């Protein structure tokens, strides 16, 4: 999605210039790069150092490992860890099966409606779980759930068939949210595997199934494993759905337990001590993933389906279609439809007809006397600021890494990418420990957290694009008389505009739906849409929660469409 | 490339403000070198990429840095451009210090033009915008920019393409855009980093000729880096042959080809047979009688410092080998037909010889008689 490749930039470029000269003679460059590095240290290194320090010190500030012991003996901690483990096992297994099977169907067979499957996978990955959970509660809560009542009426059964307020319900919601990771990763791998590999096996006498299992599967196995690890990490660090369902069904996982520790009275050392093992585990997993993938990997939505001769499924075509349609239904149609209907319902429990549907919840949302409007403003402001900050930092940092010989520039990459693998909630704890005194109750606190966590998205995009732009283009401008800043402004930025734009939009959308850190850091005056949704659910105003969720979903889907369009246009212009 | 150009010297005078106030007065009759390198050194780790280079380029002169890859020629060019800082020595541009180990004028302040190996034409700007950029940065008035860009585009035969984007141009046209962009600011020195190496062979040949003609008309001084000896011979007023960061020889193309100072130069430029022999006599006019170990005796040329009776190496070019009866007997090993001539591989005594002939010489049993042209082969010092 970021292969902006100007004709002349594709020619072989000489090694990047060894710029050693005149750092002092160029105060503007020195100031800008210095500021970027300082910002990076401030928003990433400093909170992480605090996190580590707090986990290793007791109440008196002396070094101790006791906090880890205390964590283990905290009531319910063992059960929470166990729940996390079981949840991860289930979600990884189901996501891998569903994602791989769907990817194979789409990439290699003649199953109908492939575009629909791809679109729905995109949608269900973009919608965060604290929003889908709202829809599912409406649809499948044990007694009031609309689907339950519908089926009980139709089938004449006495007990509700579904119970979303359960551990199984949580597994379903997480799986629906995360299978797209496996799906897109395997889909793109399958599309990259030359069909001739399979055809060679067929020529040698292997059957269809056999050639798929013995040739294609091993070739995409790294993609499956790598994405399974991402699913593992995302499940482990997920907070939205576990918090809502866990509260109602009365069980905890590690992230919700960590959140409880920060509730009054806040036990910062203990929270830090839980966060550290999650972090260590995460970094280990990312290390394994890097080994498997063998390169900088970044999950991107968007599988380009190349035309290959599809496998004819024969009589299995329609059962396969039904299965993929079921996934589409579960992952997009039901939750989105449920959310929309719920947001319009006037009296919950009454039949859904014209008299019971109205826009009053939306009117209330945007009534300035009501608290949600402030949250909407806060979210938009934060998303704008975060996206802009990330885009700016990403350009300067990518330039440092790709265009200078500064010693320690490799550390810049490490520092940025650490935040990528870092569980949000643990990172939130670090931000809280590091900045609570300076920025308590301000949006700045949230901005720091958002920017640090989402910088990797823009950085990876911009760096990849910058790599493809020959340094000669910048040098030519210098020779023509332009200084560093003017060169960056006139040459580098215009050439990076597609990547920077896509990065900006993605970060905007990620910020709009951020919950895990916001829930730790937002105070009365700094509530954002996600925290308000969680609060509305807790207060029982689920219709209001649905209405606000629809707003968030609309923004996120709009943004996704925009990215698709820009990336597609850039690809067709330069591809 | 037929457009008229205003008197060269007038435009060059108008460029003077770019050069800053510290340019010494050229009217005094002393031509200030456009570029002067004084004992330039660049190290990378333990190795000296450029190892003590001294060079001066006079106004209007074309100097070509020629050498195999890794000889330090591109590093030298990048130090002149300002993308690298020397570790020792000094770079002077138009009489002004531009770089030393302690000081570096940034590239944008050096008033240079540069052509890059991969054109480096900005893909997001039109042809006009590409060429106009340097003038815009310099703050020239809009009308003046239009006038100068249009004139420059006419010079490189691109009038009518001003509104196009580089992606719509051929490789040769992009190269001309790069050339126009480099020349439009009337730089005091034009740097060229293997600018023709990305073009196909036919285009490379014609661009070579055009570049030469254009340089003659515009009169710009050039420092040109290449590993292509034909390019060097065609374009250069002087060739600097480099090897291992040092200058192996500086001279006119004729000097370098006919009077190489070292074995390396002789073998790098053109094809050369290096044959051992003995100096039998010297006439004090640079002529010497040489007896090759393989047999032939002939009159060769040589520099000062040779002594009669000494052992020597003689550079014999393939075209200096004659086929006439009464010479030494050689065996023919291989014949290649190249259209305009034949290339022959001969065995003369212990040595192999590369020779050229327009017609296949007379042979008997695969043996033929060879001699070496008088007053053309060169005795290495």
Image: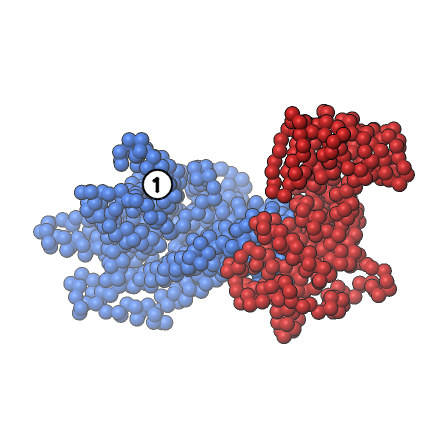
Of residue A401 and residue B267, the one placed in the foreground of this image is B267
The chain holding disc 1 is: A
Identified at 29% across, 47% down, the residue is A106
Q: Which residue reaches farthest right?
A: B284
Badge 1 marks a residue whose secondary structure is: helix
For the residue pair A541 and B25, the one nearer the viewer reads as: B25
Quarter of the image containing the C terminus of chain B? Answer: top right
Residue A67 x, y percent position in the rendering: 46, 40
Residue situated furthest bottom in the rendering: B143
Q: Is residue B34 left or right of residue A127?
A: right
Residue B248 position in % (x across, y down) = 76, 41
At a point 51% along the width and 49% down the height, the residue shown is: A416
Residue A539 vs residue A14: left or right? left
Taking A11 as reference, is A24 left or right?
right
The residue lying toward the viewer, choosing from A274 and A147, is A147
Which of B37 and A379 lies nearest the eye of the viewer? B37
**Above or below: residue B154 compared with residue B244:** below
Residue occupying image coordinates x 76% and y 26% = B294
- Percent position of residue B151, x then y: 64, 69
Tell me which residue sits at (36%, 50%) in the image: A303
Tell how many labels. 1
Residue that mark 1 sits on:
A195
Residue B377, x across and y down, in percent:
78, 37
- Mark yes or no: residue A337 visible: yes
Chain letter, colour blue in render: A
Q: Is residue A545 left or right of residue A314?
A: right
Quadrant into which the N terminus of chain B falls: bottom right
Of all chains in the rendering, the one displayed in red is B
Residue A447 in view of the camera: no
Label 1 Cα neighbours within 10 Å, binned few <14 / some 14-19 / many ≥20: some
When the figure is inspected, residue A180 is found, relative to residue B21, above or below; the finding is above
Q: How is the image coloured?
A: by chain
């Amino acid at each position: 999605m970021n292969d902006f490749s100007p004709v002349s930039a594709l020619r072989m470029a000489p090694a990047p210039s060894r710029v050693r000269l005149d750092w002092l003679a160029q105060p503007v460059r020195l100031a800008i790069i210095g500021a970027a590095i300082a910002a990076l240290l401030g928003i990433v290194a400093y909170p992480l150092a605090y996190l580590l320090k707090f986990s290793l010190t007791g109440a008196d500030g002396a070094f101790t490992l006791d906090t880890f012991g205390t964590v283990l003996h905290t009531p319910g901690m063992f059960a929470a860890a166990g729940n996390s483990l079981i949840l991860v096992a289930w979600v990884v297994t189901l996501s891998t099966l569903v994602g791989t099977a769907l990817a194979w169907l789409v990439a290699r067979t003649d199953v109908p409606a492939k575009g629909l499957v791809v679109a729905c996978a995109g949608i269900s990955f973009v919608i965060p779980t604290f929003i889908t959970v709202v829809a599912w509660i409406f649809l499948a809560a044990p007694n009031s759930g609309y689907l339950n009542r519908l089926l009980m009426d139709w089938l004449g059964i006495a007990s509700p068939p579904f119970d979303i307020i359960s551990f199984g319900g949580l597994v379903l919601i997480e799986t629906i949210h995360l299978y797209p990771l496996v799906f897109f990763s395997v889909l793109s791998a399958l599309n990259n595997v030359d069909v001739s590999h399979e055809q060679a096996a067929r020529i040698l006498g292997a059957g269809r199934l056999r050639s798929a299992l013995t040739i294609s599967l091993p070739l995409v196995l790294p993609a499956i494993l790598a994405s399974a690890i991402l699913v593992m990490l995302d499940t482990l660090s997920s907070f939205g759905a576990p918090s809502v369902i866990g509260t109602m069904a009365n069980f905890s996982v590690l992230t919700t337990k960590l959140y409880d520790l920060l509730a009054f009275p806040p036990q910062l050392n203990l929270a830090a001590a839980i966060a550290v093992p999650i972090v260590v585990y995460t970094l280990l997993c990312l290390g394994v993933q890097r080994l498997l993938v063998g390169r900088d990997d970044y999950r991107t939505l968007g599988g380009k389906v190349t035309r290959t001769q599809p496998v004819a499924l024969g009589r299995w075509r329609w059962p396969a279609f039904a299965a993929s349609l079921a996934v589409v239904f579960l992952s997009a149609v039901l939750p989105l439809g449920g959310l929309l209907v719920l947001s319009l319902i006037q009296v919950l429990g009454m039949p859904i007809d014209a008299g019971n549907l109205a826009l009053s919840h939306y009117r209330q949302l945007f009534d300035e006397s009501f608290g949600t409007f402030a949250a909407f403003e806060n979210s938009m402001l934060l998303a704008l600021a975060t996206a802009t900050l990330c885009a700016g930092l990403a350009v300067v940092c990518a330039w440092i890494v790709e265009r200078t010989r500064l010693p320690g520039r490799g550390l810049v990459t490490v520092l940025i990418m650490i935040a990528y693998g870092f569980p949000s909630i643990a990172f939130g704890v670090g931000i809280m420990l590091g900045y609570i005194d300076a920025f308590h109750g301000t949006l700045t606190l949230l901005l720091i957290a958002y920017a640090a966590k989402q910088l990797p998205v823009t950085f990876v995009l911009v760096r990849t694009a910058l790599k493809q732009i020959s340094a000669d283009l910048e040098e030519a401008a210098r020779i023509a008389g332009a200084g560093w800043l003017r060169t960056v402004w006139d040459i580098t930025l215009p050439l990076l505009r597609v990547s920077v734009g896509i990065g900006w939009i993605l970060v905007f959308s990620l910020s709009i739906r951020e919950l895990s850190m916001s829930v730790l850091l937002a105070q009365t005056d700094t509530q954002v849409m996600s925290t308000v949704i969680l609060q509305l659910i807790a207060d029982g105003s689920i219709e209001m929660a649905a209405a606000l969720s629809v707003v968030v979903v609309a923004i996120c889907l709009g943004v996704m469409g925009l990215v698709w369009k820009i990336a597609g246009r850039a690809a067709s212009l330069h591809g | 490339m037929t457009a008229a150009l205003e008197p060269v010297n007038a435009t060059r005078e108008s460029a003077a403000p770019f050069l800053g106030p510290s340019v010494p007065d050229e009217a005094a009759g002393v031509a200030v070198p456009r570029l002067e390198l004084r004992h330039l050194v660049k190290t990378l780790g333990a190795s000296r990429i450029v190892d003590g280079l001294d060079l001066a380029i006079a106004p209007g002169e074309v100097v070509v840095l020629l050498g195999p890859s890794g000889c330090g020629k591109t590093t030298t060019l990048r130090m002149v451009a300002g993308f690298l800082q020397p570790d020792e020595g000094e770079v002077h541009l138009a009489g002004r210090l531009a770089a030393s180990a302690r000081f570096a004028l940034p590239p944008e302040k050096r008033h240079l033009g540069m052509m890059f190996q991969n054109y480096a034409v900005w893909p997001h700007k039109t042809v006009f915008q590409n060429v106009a950029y340097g003038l815009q940065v310099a703050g020239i008035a809009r009308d003046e920019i239009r006038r100068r860009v249009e004139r420059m585009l006419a010079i490189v035969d691109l009038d009518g393409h001003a509104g196009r984007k580089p992606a719509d141009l051929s490789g040769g046209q992009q190269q001309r855009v790069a050339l126009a962009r480099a020349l439009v600011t009337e730089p005091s020195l034009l740097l060229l980093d293997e600018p023709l190496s990305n073009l196909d062979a036919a285009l490379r040949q014609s661009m070579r000729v055009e570049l030469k003609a254009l340089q003659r008309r515009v009169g710009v001084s050039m420092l040109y880096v290449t590993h292509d000896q034909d390019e060097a011979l065609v374009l250069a007023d002087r060739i600097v042959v480099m090897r291992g960061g040092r200058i192996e020889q500086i001279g006119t193309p004729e000097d370098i080809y006919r009077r190489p100072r070292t074995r390396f130069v002789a073998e790098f430029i053109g094809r050369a047979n290096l044959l051992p022999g003995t100096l039998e006599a010297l006439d004090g006019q640079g002529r010497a009688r040489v007896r090759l170990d393989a047999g032939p005796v002939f009159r060769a040329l040589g520099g000062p410092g040779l002594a009669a009776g000494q052992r020597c190496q003689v550079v014999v070019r393939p075209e200096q080998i004659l086929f006439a009866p009464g010479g030494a007997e050689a065996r023919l090993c291989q014949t290649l037909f190249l259209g305009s001539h034949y290339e022959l591989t001969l065995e003369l005594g212990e040595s192999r010889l590369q020779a050229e002939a327009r017609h296949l010489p007379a042979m008997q049993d695969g043996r033929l008689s060879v001699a070496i042209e008088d007053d053309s082969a060169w005795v290495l010092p």
